[in-house]
Amino acid sequence: MTKEDIKSKGIPCDTLSKYKGAYTLRKSFFWKDSSSIEISEKLKDNFPNVDILDTWDKYVPFRGGDTIKEGSHYGVKFIVK
């Protein structure tokens, strides 16, 4: 699975990483306009072979130069069966 596969289904995704078989999707935000739960539901609807392991909404005050992981973002950790 690639970031392009996910984005082609209309699912917001800034980064996609894989570690020990589990994928981590992150979508940055400045104003909260969605949630990790909504993203995980879209992921599950479009890719039925996905099992969601964890979701989170991380909010931190804006600091210029932060990476997506360091800044405010929605996160979804999942595996593909």
Image: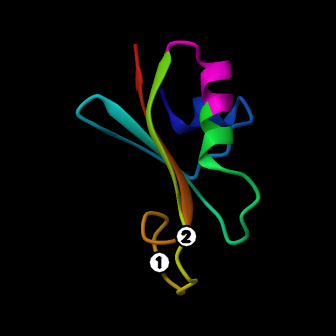
Q: Position of residue 47 (x, y in %)?
A: 59, 18
Residue plotted at (53% across, 86% down): 63
In the rendered view, tell whether residue 80 sits above or below residue 7. above
Q: Residues within 10 Å of mark 1 (few under 14, many from 20)?
A: few
Q: Disc 2 or 1, which lies upstream in sequence?
A: 2
Q: Position of residue 55 (x, y in %)?
A: 49, 44
Q: Residues within 10 Å of mark 2 (few under 14, many from 20)?
A: some
The verdict on residue 46 being magenta is yes
Q: Quadrant of the C terminus?
A: top left
Label 2 and label 1: CA atoms lie apart by: 12 Å
Residue plotted at (55% across, 61% down): 73
Q: Main secondary structure of the magenta part?
A: helix
Q: Is residue 10 left or right of residue 26?
A: right
Q: Position of residue 8 (x, y in %)?
A: 70, 31
Residue plotted at (66% across, 20% down): 46
Q: Position of residue 53 (x, y in %)?
A: 41, 32
- Amino acid type at circle 2 is Tyr
What residue occupies the far left of the structure in this picture?
Answer: 20
Quarter of the image for residue 40 reads top right
Nearest to the observer: residue 2 or residue 19: 19
Would you name the residue on which mark 2 appears?
59
Q: Which residues are magenta?
A: 41-49
What residue occupies the far bottom of the structure in this picture?
Answer: 63
In the rendered view, tell whether residue 20 sits above or below residue 73. above
Numbered tag placed on residue 66 in the rendering: 1
Question: What kind of element bears circle 1?
Answer: loop
Nearest to the observer: residue 53 or residue 4: 53
